[in-house]
Image (cartoon, rainbow, N blue to C red):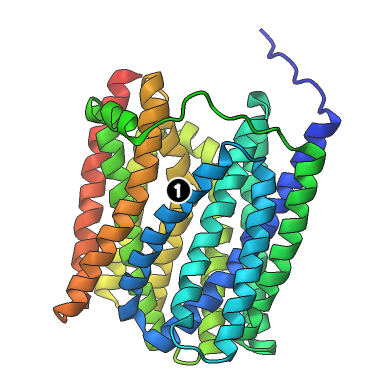
Amino acid sequence: MAEPQTSPLTQIQKVRLLGLSALIFVILASYAIARPATESLFLGAHGADSLPLAWLLVGLGSLAVVLVYNRFAATTDLVKIFGATSAISGITLVAILSALAADLPGTLWVLYLWKDLYIVVLIEVFWSFANSTVPQERAKWWYGLFCVLGSLGGMAGNLGVGWLASATSTESSLWAVVVLLVVGGIGGISLARWAGVEAKTPERKPSLLAGLGVLRASRPLWLLMALIGTTQIVITLIDYQFSVAIEANYPDADARTAIIGQVYAAIDLAAISLQLATGPIIRLIGLPLVLLAIPGLLGCAVAGFAIVPKFGAIAVGKVASKAFDYSLFRAAKEILYIPLSHAEKTQGKAFVDMMSYRMAKGATSLMLLGLVALGRPEAAMGVTIACILVWIWLTVQLNRGHSSAA
């Protein structure tokens, strides 16, 4: 029996497709410039030992920002929020750069916090709008396009930031982010006017307590929460060890900015390749083997760095951890929700996704702060390998449950 043909795109759908494609390109290009420049400046001023405290502040700040965002998201057009957030982020960055030029104390801490908070809201708004407007039969094609264009925007920014830093300075390169945020703000407001959706106040807002009740009764959700938390601990630990290595190998700020940008460009290239190949890979070797292969390959990269502690080895580990997280792991993780009940896939999933990422980042930051205080930051390598083994064990448990439910 032939599959039903998809109806032609309406004019408003074409506007949304083109508008969302442009927005995700611009937003990830802006972050690809902001991230290497900010990390380079922060490492130069405060060193890698200060990163765990910065990550802890980011976790707390993210929670506060999400709470504010949720208050407005129910009653305001999502793309208007995107435009407003872009404008506020741009104005805030101008103020930060002005304070940086005046050499005000604490400015780089504020810049680091800003860098991670503005992107949280813009990405959340983007996917919420996409989920609200993209027809289900088109989502698998449109979402793949969005991921690829986002990665291309990231590559453009990551490669461009090195050129900008060399031509001007790392600090001056951040003004390009202001320009991109202005473009994104204008684009978001225009898209809201031409192809937005009228926001409706929900009859009943989902509560964290309801999600906790579903989570309490579901073993698969507990395993998923543990799995996601463990993966984020591993990725954060690899990020820390990469930062230590790059601080030691690249003392010049502009050279450090360029190499960080190149590493993130490699992440984008690897992520694009895996995003395009995710479907065939899962179909060819199966979901259980994909889920096991990710920590296995990542463990090999980390072990390689432990045996031969060279910068290239930890750079490979960072590229692998981020690329897998942005592609194969994300797709495979979502498939694990499919056999679950409606409550588990809605209220339970919201609780898992909301809490596990932030809790893992905060817990890792506290652990790293403790290791630094004890004078044993090198112990992070042993913890990373131990967490990868836990990751493999959790994957085996989830695969068993998924196979029995399928």
Image-quadrant location for residue 46? bottom left
Q: State which quarter of the image contains the C terminus.
A: top left
Q: Secondary structure at mark 1?
A: helix
Local crowd size for mark 1, using a 10 Å CA cut-off: few (<14), some (14–19), many (≥20): few
The reply to whether residue 400 is in sight is no
Determine the residue located farthest toward the left in the rendered image.
374
Residue 231 location in percent, x, y? 32, 51
Residue 369 image point, x, y percent: 23, 72
Residue 49 visible in the shown view: yes
Residue found 81% across the figure and 28% down from its top: 9
Along the horizontal axis of the image, is 71 left or right of 164? left
Count the labels in the image.
Answer: 1
As drawn, 273 above or below 405? below
Q: Is 86 in front, or is 44?
A: 86
In the displayed structure, 312 sits above or below 61; it is below
Image x and y of residue 259, in percent: 53, 79
Q: Which residue position holds label 1?
A: 67
Residue drawn at x 35%, y 74% as measured from the top left: 51
Residue 269: x %, y % from top left: 58, 59
Amino acid type for the residue under numbered disc 1: Leu
